Amino acid sequence: MSRFAYSSSVRDFVFDVETNQFMGKICEGASLNRIGGSESEKRSWAANADKIRNLISLAHIPDDAWIGFEYKSPIAGRVDCMMFGTDEHDQSHVIHIELKQWSNKSVNCLYDTGVFEVNAFVGGQYQILPHPSLQALSYHLNILNYIPAVAEKDENTLNGFAYCYNYFHEKQPNDLFAPQYEPVMEKCPLYGGDEVVSYAQSLGSLLSSGRGREVFQEFISSPVHPTKNLINAAANMMQGNQEFVL
């Protein structure tokens, strides 16, 4: 079984979206691999695919970069979107993206010191949920802690982002960008819908040389077990040192 509901080259993904085949393929993959598939999830998948397709176009990401949707994280949760490839210096990059459809009027700050949560209108009611960058960071640490193929590479290999494409940084209220969330936004940057050009430039620089199949295959074939990153963090905690653990 695959840990992805959908994965392909960027070229094939764009073709699937443009020819209205993407939803059929991701739903089939989700069913085969027991990865969600509720009606609300399907609506999110369709909206996310369209926005990622736009990012790819703006970023001029090469056809042979690789992309995946709905990755089952090693411990818990699913990563909305991942991309794989190399930059101009032949550095491999594994990118994960937390996608949200939240708008400026649907999210409020929670003013608790050290709590990176928000009050967001989801599913017909307000709920206390992790800030998007915190959710991205949880997946980031999960991958580093359990995927040796990533954890044992250069620290710049793994890149995490949050992208709220219906939320605008320069529009008020903009509680998602409040200073209290800076510690997590520094680790996994948040981009709003009015920052799509700068976000595309960031993605484009990371994947400028394409060649994503090999990076993807190394990632997906990696054994899943505690890495040195997790073992060292646990040892530091036993010694009374602080660790950013979720």
Image (cartoon, helix red, strand yellow):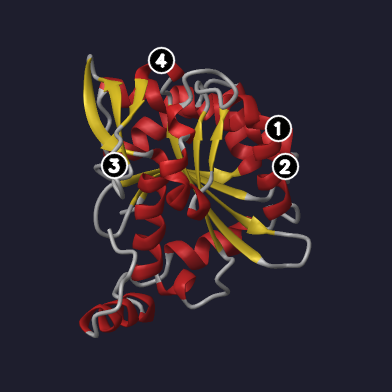
Q: Secondary structure at mark 3?
A: helix
Q: Position of residue 53 (x, y in %)?
A: 61, 30
Q: Nearer the viewer, residue 82 or 134?
A: 134
Q: With 193 as the anchor, is 74 left or right in this view?
A: left
Q: Position of residue 21 (x, y in %)?
A: 51, 25
Q: Quadrant of the N terminus?
A: bottom left
Q: Residue at x 29, y 46 (%)?
A: 115
Q: Amino acid at mark 3?
A: Leu
Q: Position of residue 34 (x, y in %)?
A: 24, 42
Q: Could you give the CA–CA distance between mark 2 and mark 3, rounded to whole angstroms?
A: 35 Å
For disc 4, the marked residue is: 105
Residue 30 visible: yes
On residue 201, the disc is 2
Q: With 243 as the anchor, is 190 left or right in this view?
A: right
Q: Nearer the viewer, residue 128 or 60?
A: 128
Tell which circle, 2 or 3, labels the residue nearer the N-terminal end.
3
Mark 2 or mark 3: which is in front?
A: 2
Q: Could you give the CA–CA distance between mark 1 and mark 2, rounded to whole angstroms?
A: 6 Å
Q: Residue at x 60, y 60 (%)?
A: 93
Q: Position of residue 244 (x, y in %)?
A: 34, 64
Tell which circle, 4 or 3, labels the residue nearer the N-terminal end.
3
Residue 160 visible: no
Q: Could you give the CA–CA distance between mark 4 and mark 3, rounded to whole angstroms?
A: 37 Å
Mark 4 or mark 2: which is in front?
A: 4
Q: Residue at x 51, y 35 (%)?
A: 163
Mark 1 or mark 4: which is in front?
A: 4
- Marks 1/2 in contact by CB < 8 Å: the verdict is yes
Q: Amino acid at mark 1?
A: Val
For disc 1, the marked residue is: 197
For disc 3, the marked residue is: 32
On residue 29, the disc is none
Q: Could you give the CA–CA distance between mark 1 and mark 3, rounded to whole angstroms?
A: 36 Å
